[in-house]
Image (spheres, helix red, strand yellow):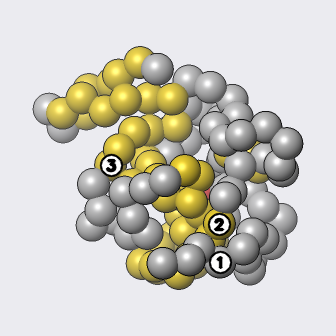
């Protein structure tokens, strides 16, 4: 993992290709984007790291949150890729406008 400087604060960048445990389905992040991973399902949550361009992620679960727009449309679905790590589904090519993983509990 490396860090990058943006707006005066260092943020870790994950330079791996698959960001969750092996064995499940992985999905590509929109080409050309270094997507911010947030602590919760909305842009008001702090950024915990950024994904590398060309990253693939495994979605552990999904939940509804802030409605945002991205390269794959507008949605309120957020993908959990790890404990306290969410990205907007509008930056992930899942092939669906709906949920593709179980709903997050809690």
In percent of width and height, residue 80 lies at 57, 60
CB under 8 Å between discs 2 and 1: yes
Label 3 neighbour load within 10 Å: few <14, some 14-19, many 20+:
some
In this view, the residue in front, 35 or 45, is 45
- Marks 3, 2: nearer the viewer: 2
Residue at image mark 1? 103
Q: Are marks 1 and 3 in contact (CB under 8 Å)?
A: no
Question: Residue 20 at what x, y percent from top left?
Answer: 66, 41
Instruction: Identify the secondary structure beneath mark 3.
Output: strand
Place residue 97 in its image quadrant.
Answer: bottom right
Q: CA distance from mark 3 to mark 2?
A: 19 Å
Q: Secondary structure at mark 2?
A: strand
Q: Is residue 72 above or below residue 6?
A: below
Q: Earlier in the sequence, mark 2 or mark 1?
A: 2
Camera-side residue: 85 or 5? 85
Residue plotted at (31% across, 33% down): 11
Q: Secondary structure at mark 1?
A: loop
CA–CA distance in space, label 2 to label 1 = 5 Å
The residue that disc 3 covers is 47
Q: Which mark is residue 61?
A: 2
Of labels 1 and 3, the one closer to you: 1
């Amino acid at each position: 993992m490396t860090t990058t400087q943006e707006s005066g604060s260092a943020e870790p960048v994950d330079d791996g290709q698959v960001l969750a445990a092996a064995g499940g389905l992985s999905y590509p992040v929109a080409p050309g984007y270094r997507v911010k991973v947030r602590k919760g399902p909305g842009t008001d949550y702090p950024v915990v790291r950024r994904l590398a361009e060309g990253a693939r992620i495994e979605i552990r679960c999904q939940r509804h949150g802030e409605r945002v727009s991205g390269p794959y449309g507008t949605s309120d679905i957020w993908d959990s890729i790890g404990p306290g790590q969410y990205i907007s589904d509008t930056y992930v090519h899942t092939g669906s406008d709906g949920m593709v993983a179980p709903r997050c509990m809690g």
